[in-house]
Image: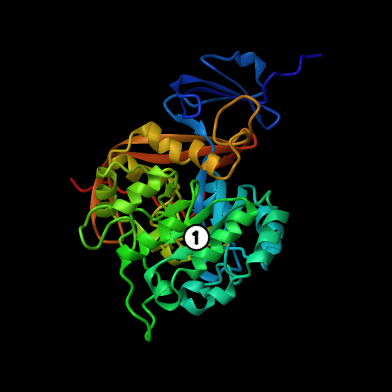
Amino acid sequence: MSEPHSFDLILRGGRILDPASGRDAAGDVGIQGGRIKAVADRLPEEAAARVIDVTGRLVAPGLIDTHAHVYEGVTGRFGLNPDMVGVRSGVSTLVDQGGPSLMTLPGFRRFIAEPSRSRTLCFLSAYLVGGLEGHYYPQLYRPDCVDVEATIRVGLANRDLVKGIKAHCEMGGASRWGLEVMKLAKKIAVGVGVPLYVHLGRLWPDAEDGEAVDPDLLVEELIPILEPGDILAHPFTRHPGGFISTKTGEVHPIIHKALELGLTVDVGHGSHFSFEMARRTLAAGILPTTLGADMHGYNVKAPSAANDADRSANPFFGVAPFSLAHAMTELLALGVPLMEVMKTVTTNPAHMVGMSDEIGALTPGMAADVAVLDLLPGRWQLSDNSGETVTADQMFVPAFSLRAGELIEVDSPLLPKPIAAVA
């Protein structure tokens, strides 16, 4: 009778990038019972039931996307299928930003979080309406559409899923009701004991009967409401009301003060991302803390040709122009060091959701969420929604991932294909 194996799986010979330990070296990762069991220069092959050679590939903690929209079927054209954005795109953990509200969180748990192969968490919407295509209906985001006490009760009762609160600070809303909604959202976050995630950058036009809001002044008035650990989203937005002053074209001084006080920064890529704004922000010494792809149905584009499998698997039937790996590539192309890029999708977001003891690192005893990626050399074309094109000399492409030790292939029809830059 043969002896039982010490490992269910060994990932052999990859370049291990683990920001939590600072490791950047070739080695093996051993998995047993859905947990990381060992990380070493070499593990005995005969001790494993299965060995996968990943020589030449990056092996990192499972990727964490801090800005997802995956309340499929409920948030209208926003909500994508969680596993197509998650594990089938090489991402182990998703944080839905503001899709569920106090009224719709039970459905999010039953129909999204529980059946998904991806670990699916959320930042609960401060608004009763949640993410129900509210971008088209600003009146649904007014102060009397916020129930502070009830949202706190629901958040506390669902702390396994609820890792933060989501709200918006932008000129269109402020022209209607000032910063009252932000003050209410902060009360909710304090009551639940979680961070507040703040959208920056215009969403709605100014109220017809209201005064135009100075975007710089709006940001100045916002910061005193917030506390260490709260999150400023969309630092690279092309829309006014973000990190870049509309008067000077430089990072607003209040942003530097906010970061000194302990606020953090989430890229929240989406259709907001601008290379020019990213350059200005990075040049000011501001590195993003976390990186969210902000993929949603509005930015899925129909392909010129597709098969029936793609059509049935993807309710929006198309390809997104970016992904979390694509956003990582953009940070790298902008000069952010490789290990710093990896922090934004591993250790830092694990801390953000209060799960550093479970995910975000290749530490023995933690969940065996592992990302295996290729970092392809070449000349790759990247573009933003402002129309600027940039050439990258390296491209992150997810090969496969492990979620609690289960190997999942990267086959999402949403993923964009790398585009070679024209010489």
Q: How is the image coloured?
A: rainbow
The residue at which mark 1 appears reads as 307
> Quick check: 59 above or below 255?
above
The furthest residue to the left? 423
Q: Quadrant where the C terminus lies?
A: top left
Is 404 placed above or below 74 here?
above
Label 1: which secondary element: loop
- Pick the residue in front: 46 or 36: 36
Left of 65 or right of it: where is 303?
A: left
Judge by depth and name the residue closer to the eye, 57 or 218. 218
Q: Quadrant of the N terminus?
A: top right
Q: Of the residues shown, which amino acid type is indicated by label 1?
A: Asn
Q: How many marks?
A: 1
Q: Residue at x 55, y 31 (%)?
A: 361
User: Seen from this angle, which residue lies furthest right?
Assistant: 1
Q: Nearer the viewer, residue 192 or 199?
A: 192
Instruction: Give how far across and how far down residue 108 sits, in percent.
Output: 66, 60
Q: Quadrant of residue 273?
A: bottom left
Q: Horizontally, is 358 left or right of 400 in the view?
A: right
Residue at the image position 43 percent from the left and 56 percent from the top? 224
In the rendering, at what x and y percent does residue 259 appear? 39, 45
* Place of residue 84 in the rendered image (x, y in percent of width and height, measured from the top left): 54, 53
Q: Residue at x 60, y 15 (%)?
A: 45
Q: Residue furthest front?
A: 224
- Residue 123 seen by the camera: no
Q: Is residue 279 above or below residue 406?
A: below
